[in-house]
Image: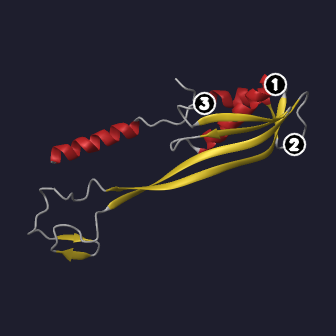
Amino acid sequence: MLKSAALLATAALALSACATATPYGPAGPSSRYGYSEQRVDSDRYRVSFSGNSVTSREQVEMGLLLRAAEITLQNGADWFATVERATDRDVRFQASPDPFFYHRYSPFWGPRWRFYHRGYWSPWRYDPFGPELDVREIDRYEATAEIVLGRGRKPAGDPNAFDAREVIDNLGPRVPRAM
């Protein structure tokens, strides 16, 4: 039993090491994570970027701006302005038994042993209040913006206006790509 518990813990660590941030690419039938866009008007788009649970808010927002800049250049425009912009955070909690606490079938805990738990001494082999749990908070971000495309020089002094080429030059190298 002890060997199987150690093997299970090793497998869990190996799988958690494989988790990577959402790579920059289109969301689709195989993955709901990535970018998507919808044309709203001739010079207006709704763009979104959705990240998995290991993608930071910063990476999600950079993916959104990078896609907005690409759409701008693909349509022959020079700059874009965000009309509406929001980043949503989806939080969920995952509880799992603590692998380092006693296990029901553990050879180290017997009916004659007493152990100290939650502030009291107990003669029970099993905790009558249930097993110890590790609770982990899992965050997932999705950024959405409605953008308006513009030609010529970017409006000076508008904090919501972005030069598409500058965005691609500055953010492009920082956004993780699919291998």
- Mark 1 and 3 residues: CB-CB less than 8 Å, in contact? no
160 w.r.t. 78: above or below = below
Q: Amino acid at mark 1?
A: Asn
The tag on residue 75 is 1
Outermost residue to the bottom? 120
Return the disc, 2 or 1, that comes first in the chain's sequence: 1
Numbered disc 1: secondary structure: loop
Give whichever of 130, 57 is nearer the camera: 130
2 w.r.t. 135: above or below = above
Pointer 3 local density, CA inside 10 Å: few below 14, some 14–19, many at least 20: many
Mark pair 1, 3: CA separation: 20 Å
Which residue corresponds to the image point at 11% horizontal and 56% vertical from the top-left? 107
The residue beneath circle 3 is 24
Please state if 145 lies on the left or on the right of 8 as rendered: right
* Residue 135 lies in quadrant: bottom left
Give whichever of 173, 124 is nearer the camera: 124
Q: Amino acid at mark 3?
A: Tyr
Residue 127 placed where, x, y %? 23, 68
Return the disc, 3 or 2, that comes first in the chain's sequence: 3
The residue beneath circle 2 is 158
Residue 60 placed where, x, y %? 62, 40
Which residue corresponds to the image point at 53% horizontal and 50% vertical from the top-left? 139
Return the disc, 1 or 3, that comes first in the chain's sequence: 3
Q: Amino acid at mark 2?
A: Asp
Numbered disc 3: secondary structure: loop
The tag on residue 162 is none
Mark pair 3, 2: CA separation: 27 Å
Which residue corresponds to the image point at 76% horizontal and 28% vertical from the top-left? 71
- Mark 3 and 2 residues: CB-CB less than 8 Å, in contact? no
Give whichever of 25, 160 is nearer the camera: 25
